[in-house]
Image (spheres, coloured by chain):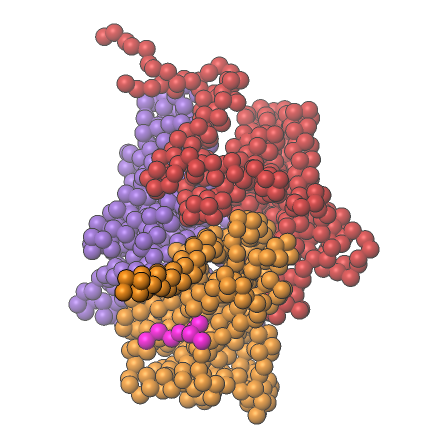
Chain colours: A orange, B red, C purple
Amino acid sequence: MSIKRRTFIQAAGAGLAAGTLPLLGRKARAADFKAGYIYVGPIGDFGWSYQHDQGRLAADKALGTTSTYVEKVPEGADAERVIRELADTGHGIIFTTSFGFMDATLKVARDYPDVKFEHATGYKRADNVATYNIRFYEGRYIQGVIAAKMSKAGVVGYIGSIPIPEVIMGMNAFILGMRSINPQAKLKQVFINSWYDPGKEADAAKALLDQGADLMAQHTDSPAPLQVAADRGLKGFGQASDMIKFAPNAQLTSSIDHWDGYYTERVKAAMDGTWKSEDVWKGLDTGMLKMAEYANMPDDVKKLAMDTEEAIKTGKLAIFKGPINAQDGSVKVADGTTLGDGDIAGMNWLAEGVEGDLPK
Amino acid sequence: MRLEIIPRGARSQVWTYASPLLAIALTLATTLIIFLLLGKEPLEALRVMWIDPLLTKRGFSELFVKAAPLIMIGVGLSLGFRANIWNIGAEGQYVMGAIFATGVALYFYDVESFPIWLLMIPAGILGGMFWGAIPALLKTRFNASEILTSLMLTYVAKLVLLYLVVGPWKDPDGYGFPQSRLLTSAASSPHLIPGTRIHVGVVAALIVVAIGWFLLSKSLLGFKLKVAGQAPRAAAYAGFSTKSLTWLSLLVGGGLAGLAGMFEIAGPIGQLTPALPTGYGFTAIIVAFLGRLHPVGVLFGGLVLALSYLGGEKAQIALGLPAAVTMINQGILLFYLLACDLLIRYRISLPTRKVA
Amino acid sequence: MDSVVFTSVVLSIISASTPLLLAATGELVTEKSGVLNLGVEGMMLVGAVVGFAVTLTTGNAFIGILAAALGGALMALIFSVLTLTLLANQVATGLALTIFGIGLAAMMGASFVGQPVGKLPALDLPYLTDLPLIGRILFGQDGLVYFSFIALGGTIWFLFHSHAGLVLRAVGDSHDAAHAIGYPVIAIRYGATLFGGAMSGLGGAYLSLSYTPMWAEDMTAGRGWIALALVVFATWRPLRLLLGAYLFGGITILQFHVQTLGLGIPAQMVSMLPYLATIVVLVVISTDRSKIRLNAPACLGRPFHVSG
């Protein structure tokens, strides 16, 4: 009896050990593993850098890892030094979260083959440099569909930051979504030459609304345009984060940058040794892009929005599918063809229905 | 009890050197308290911020890379400030220098056999001088304040930069992103020490300090600048033309700022991007004053400020202190440095009691 | 342009101009006393965060606005102690104050990022506010907009119609002479600088409580510098300050209208307009040397010491 019992206890002890030891081991390793992040803005911008930092915190929480961030790093001579510093101080994976960090990331990566680098929104890769981005334009198509239903005038005001493909594809996706419902719909745009300047964003929003738009959309980071719309009893869309708190009666939805899952997955892969250099460009299907709750709209529009979201998620709906004409009426995507990722990523033309020139 | 501030007859030799040390001591004491309040180990925090950046070869070299543009611009500005010419638009002149230099680099994009960066040096200087010449013209011809015009032109220069990288100079293979092509190796200033980013521009900054020191202490020009700044009327009597000093100050200030812009483009940055202006032109104003408008002082001022940037990054990485703390610390350091300068020309004493 | 759009464009111009007018009015008084404080941007940011934080925690915008003025004034106090008592260089100290202010505001505001606050209530008078065309422009603004005009009017009265204002201008024009007459030069400059700080604080509070009701780091985005430029643009005349602030605000708004009209002008060129306009106006005004000399405080930026 007693032997049996001891055996049982021993077995149980062994089992316990077998169960816990790897767990303890993993925990110890996780706590030792450091991820580094560099941001171009302050984490207090409540926009781009803020969302990346939310992702960082989520990854740490999920994996028990520690992390470091450096904020307000200018995209010039300083970036290389900061990235190198992170690589030098035992960070196993480093996320460089702005386009302007691209060449600095590659330069440092050459000297640290064992460190994994992840560069957001860029296009240059190496064995230890991956790139990642979100298909923001998917959310903008849904916004366009909602806008077509909600705008009485059929004219939306759209604040652009800088005329790069990222912003241009967003405008085009928006007008395509809009025209899928209302073929006469128009999008009035201005570029404010800045990603983040609440005052300027508010000024631009007012100008667009005064020019006959009756709904606001934006590719800049502050809630200011949405607030302007709310102030005038109109509606609009948030950007980067859920901005419903700033405009409880005006935000229809918001495209939320959701880096949480991606950061968790990649940090874990770097820890486990399964990390590979990839080019990740995902959207609604992976949850990297999420839509804030559809609000302030009738149920039928809500349903339409959800159906559209579902269709994009499952791949039933291709956004840049022909026929698509440019502003001047020339055919850009022929009927029956769909634009490939390369063409989307380099988009430099505005689609029919967008008013206002592309800054040359 | 009131303290009195009494002028010394002459500048105190002792305090000329002791005042920055006192300022640094006071800064350390204040930041110590701040770190305590933030719940950080204060001595460790100070070590991370002020000593760690200097401990490695690379860290030490980075200090000079970061300081080079500040020193170059600071020397140019300090000459003008001596003559009471307030060029606060060095940021714009820096950008213009970079633009001109990039223009040359892009024009000779296919040339590989000739060191294009040598041609970019005069281009950068010219660009900065051009942008400095506008406030000089407006000041001498129309009496318009150079403080305002040079500041306004900074915004204009940044917009010209943006126009170029969004439009005509956009990298044709860059997926539409607003930046120029990467400069070729012929258009990059060579690295001098392997394993570091020390480039020709760093050496150029040191040469600028030497020339500035020579001009100021050994030449008639230095004398003119001093007189014009301290006694404008006397300068006029002596036949020094305010006009020519205005031109000189803004051309030299602009030219050096342009040179700094050129070396940043041809060195650590490697291409023209909208992120080029990071405030060096404004920081250099502080550097000029920290250096008491003397080229050798500017050298040290530039190094101290560069160290505060590097230390701030270290503090973020090692201690998780936000960037805001760095700025607060920089502010405090500057406050103390500026305040302690008082002791050079004044002494503080208890008032002598008067018996009523 | 129909009347509704006209009203709306004017309203946008007013809100773009108000923070500039508030901060610039304060700086004008500071400069008239002979002190050049380049730290407007930093003082505005501190005002913005303090105004926001206090309004949010107390639920009372009035207290928030007062606190913002106090915050700006405390920043100006740092500047005053350094430059007036300790005789530090004003240009460098002002720049340092901006660096300090950006950091301090970011630190204080860290826990307020992403929080909404109610917009400052606007005046709503029966009948008057509903008048077509001018109703909302004249009778539908919030308190800070009206205050910006009251402060400007008060400044004009103070500087040019009161004895105290005369003394302040005398101090700015010749501190040695003013001191010889027996005026307390340093005390007057302290007062003028603190007033400037308080007004910058209010300009910041207008941004975080009315213009775009929220707190975010660096939200002033360079408006402090523009306020500084306006003072010179106005050649130290308060009424021209009004013109300048509204001209600047106007161009800011109209550049977006020009852009949407699609005239094929690069956006950057349009954005340059306010700065180029300022230079042109400055040149025009400055050409008459006698006028400049009449208005510019002769001792601007120069330190004063009793026996110095």
Q: Position of residue C305 (x, y in %)?
A: 41, 23
Identify the image quadrant of residue B343: top left
Closest to the observer: B256 or B183?
A: B183
Q: Does residue A1 lie above or below B356 as drawn? A: below
Q: Is residue B195 visible?
A: yes
Nearer the observer, C40 or B338 = B338
Q: Is residue C294 visible?
A: no
User: At 35% from the left edge and 61% from the top edge, which residue is drawn?
Assistant: A10
Residue C43 in magenta?
no
Does residue C64 sit above or below C33 in this rendering?
Answer: below
- As drawn, the residue found furthest toward the left would be C126
The answer to whether B182 appears left or right of A31 in the picture is right
In this image, B180 relative to A351: left or right? right
The picture quadrant where one finds residue B104 is: bottom right
Residue A202, horizontal then vertical, whole percent:
39, 64
Residue B243, given in percent of the width and then of the height, sits at 62, 36
